[in-house]
Structures are given as structure tokens and as C-alpha cells.
Image (cartoon, rainbow, N blue to C red):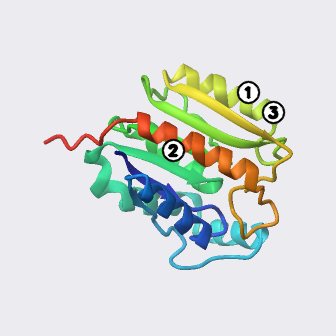
């Protein structure tokens, strides 16, 4: 089974992230949930963005790299929710040993010249999503394909942005269940973690 690093959204390491990790563990995966906010959680996206901005993008990425450094030799599947998906994408594209990338509700810019030959990538996103508009997603898809990644996009009509989080108004139980079924199948296909020497 896979070694998964699951990054939280701008709301912080909320109960929904722990619940998602527990679900993945029940399926046999090793799951790590780094806390990029040092224990802080927020109740609104505005508060979450303020915490994120206070920490700064570079520091968030530094914390994420530090948290995953001991695991990268295992061949990690990077995953995340919204802001955490953006972080996961950046780390996966920088890790030549990455075994997969699972994006829930978010993406990030694809660096010029980035390569990820045959990297399995799966994106789950609301349709429409104010944070991930169609034009952006179309360009993102083309840019990710140019890296050599094998990309799947799953869209959920009428769902809110963070529809997998039952503690938020965006929650859509049906879309969330479909997402987790598809994501678990994706993780099962990433194969066993590479424990190389």
C-alpha cells in the first residue's frame, strides 16, 4: 500500500483531515498529516487565509519539505485539500521518487520546465469552483500533461469548494463519498511503496 502525506487546507489541521487520514489507514495505507499551522485552526476561509499569509508561502513550503523529508525515500503519494493540494503539487513535482499526486479541491501553478514522467495525478474539484475556474483548470491540465504526468480530473456539479469536509457549509455527502471511492481506487493502483536502499 501507499505512503501518503496529506496536507490540510487553509482552515488548518481540522477533524475532517484526521477523519480522511483514518479512512485511508483503514484501507491499509500509511498516512502522515503534517501541521503547517503549528496547531492553529480557523472557522472561516478568511481567517485561514490570514494565517496562511502571516506564515508566508515560502515558510509553508519549507515546513512541508521538512515534514516530508524523512519519507521521500519511501516513494510518497502527495495529497492535500485546497491550499494543501497546492503544497502537495509543488512537492510532488520536485520529488523524482513521488509515486502519485492526489489533489482535493485545489491546484497550483506548474513551473516552467517541470517534469513528472508517468506520475499518476488525480484531481477532485467542485464544478463550478470559484477558486478553480474552468479556464484555469483547462490551462492547468495542459501544463500538467506537458510534464509527462498521467492526469485524471473528476468534477462534481453543484458541490461547494471544500465539499469533503462535513464540518463546513460546503459539505456534499454524496460527492464526498464518490470522491473517496475514486481516490481509494487511485491509491490502490499506486502500488506498494518503494523502500529502496
The percent coordinates of residue 20 (x first, y second) are 55, 60
Asked if 98 appears above or below 78 in the picture, the reply is above
Which residue in the structure is indicated by mark 2? 184
Q: Which mark is residue 191?
A: none
Residue 128 located left or right of residue 60 = right
- Looking at the image, which residue is at 51% across and 67% down? 36
Label 1 close to label 3 by CB (< 8 Å): yes
Which residue is denoted by mark 3 in the rendering?
A: 134
Residue 162 visible, this angle: yes
Query: Secondary structure under badge 3?
Result: helix
Q: Quadrant of residue 96?
A: top left
Looking at the picture, how far across and down is residue 104, in whole percent? 63, 48
- Label 1 neighbour load within 10 Å: few <14, some 14-19, many 20+: few
Q: CA gap, disc 1 to disc 2?
A: 25 Å
Q: Is residue 117 above or below residue 122?
A: above
Quarter of the C terminus within the rendering: top left
From the image, tell me which residue sits under label 1: 138
Which residue is rendered at x = 69% and y = 52% of the image? 176
Quadrant of residue 162 within the rendered picture: bottom right
Label 1 sits on a secondary structure element that is: helix
Q: Residue at x 75, y 50 (%)?
A: 174
Q: Residue at (44%, 38%) from the top-left corner?
A: 100
Q: Nearer the viewer, residue 52 or 15?
A: 15
Please tell me how crowded label 3 is: few (under 14), some (14-19), or many (20+) other residues with Cα within 10 Å. Answer: few
Give the quarter of the figure containing the N terminus: top left
User: Is residue 26 found left or right of 141 in the rendered image?
Assistant: left
Q: CA distance from mark 3 to mark 2?
A: 25 Å
Name the mark nearer the viewer: 3 or 2. 2
- Judged from the image, the secondary structure of the residue bearing numbered disc 2 is helix
C-alpha distance separating marks 1 and 3: 6 Å
Amino acid at each position: 500500500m501507499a505512503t501518503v502525506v496529506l496536507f490540510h487546507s487553509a482552515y488548518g489541521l481540522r477533524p475532517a483531515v484526521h477523519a480522511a487520514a483514518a479512512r485511508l489507514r483503514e484501507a491499509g495505507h500509511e498516512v502522515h498529516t503534517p501541521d503547517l499551522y503549528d496547531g492553529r485552526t480557523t472557522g472561516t476561509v478568511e481567517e485561514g487565509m490570514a494565517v496562511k499569509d502571516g506564515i508566508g508561502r515560502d515558510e509553508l513550503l519549507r515546513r512541508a519539505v521538512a515534514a516530508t523529508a524523512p519519507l521521500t525515500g519511501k516513494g510518497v503519494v502527495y495529497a492535500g485539500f485546497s491550499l494543501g493540494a497546492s503544497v502537495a503539487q509543488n512537492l510532488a513535482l520536485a520529488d523524482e521518487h513521488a509515486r502519485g499526486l492526489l489533489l482535493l479541491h485545489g491546484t497550483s501553478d506548474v513551473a516552467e520546465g517541470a517534469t513528472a514522467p508517468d506520475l499518476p495525478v488525480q484531481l477532485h474539484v467542485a464544478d463550478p469552483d470559484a477558486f478553480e475556474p474552468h479556464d484555469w483548470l483547462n490551462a492547468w491540465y495542459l501544463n500538467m500533461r506537458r510534464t509527462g504526468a498521467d492526469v485524471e480530473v473528476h468534477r462534481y456539479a453543484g458541490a461547494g469548494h471544500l465539499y469533503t469536509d462535513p464540518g463546513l457549509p460546503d459539505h456534499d455527502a454524496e460527492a464526498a463519498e464518490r470522491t473517496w471511492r475514486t481516490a481509494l481506487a487511485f491509491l490502490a493502483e499506486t502500488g506498494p511503496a518503494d523502500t529502496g536502499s
